[in-house]
Image: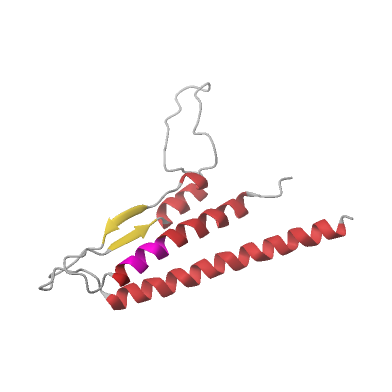
Amino acid sequence: MTLIDHTMQLLHRTLDLRQARQRVIASNIANEETPGYRAADFNFQDSLQAAQRGRGPVTLVVTQSQHMGVHGDAVQQVTGDLNPVPAGDLPLDANTVNIELEMAKMSDNAMQYNSAASIMAIRFRHLMGAIREGR
């Protein structure tokens, strides 16, 4: 039995990646008035879901039983991708920030961060309860 299981590792990595996405969104919002600024988005959900299913960001082909696989947990290796937000027609200042879209992304990201943090807190409370009863 391990104290920090796969779910806790997944929650930990999710919180790290959600925090990184929040920084990117905050940067977009802060630069709403900056001429020429190109909005970016931080995507990690597909990579994280693939890693959760056992398919890491790096896939190795194993042709012999003695080949070594990727070391470590695949979930911890997910880093995410920073990509520019596609822009349609550029305004005169060439800024691609859509403030309504960024605020919606920030709200959704914050809600999902809080959900993961709440689940992690519940897991720690259960762990503390088990420790207290083990006295």
| For residue 72, side relative to residue 5 (left or right) | left
| For residue 69, side relative to residue 84 (left or right) | right
| For residue 59, side relative to residue 87 (left or right) | right
Q: How many marks?
A: 0
Q: Is residue 134 above or below residue 101?
A: above
Picture residue at 45% right of the left edge, 49% below the top: 50
Q: Is residue 1 above or below residue 97?
A: above
Where residue 74 appears, x then y in whole percent?
A: 50, 43
Q: Is residue 52 above or below residue 60?
A: below
Answer with the quarter of the image where residue 62 lies: top left
Query: Magenta segment range?
Result: 21-27
Magenta part, dominant SS: helix
Q: Is residue 62 above or below residue 25?
A: above
Judged from this view, the residue extending furthest toward the left is 92
Judged from this view, the residue extending furthest toward the bottom is 100
Instruction: Pick the quarter of the image with the N terminus.
Output: top right
Where residue 19 appears, x then y in whole percent?
A: 46, 61
Picture residue at 52% right of the left edge, 53% below the top: 13
Depth check, front residue: 70 or 41: 41
Where residue 57 appears, x then y in whole percent?
A: 42, 43
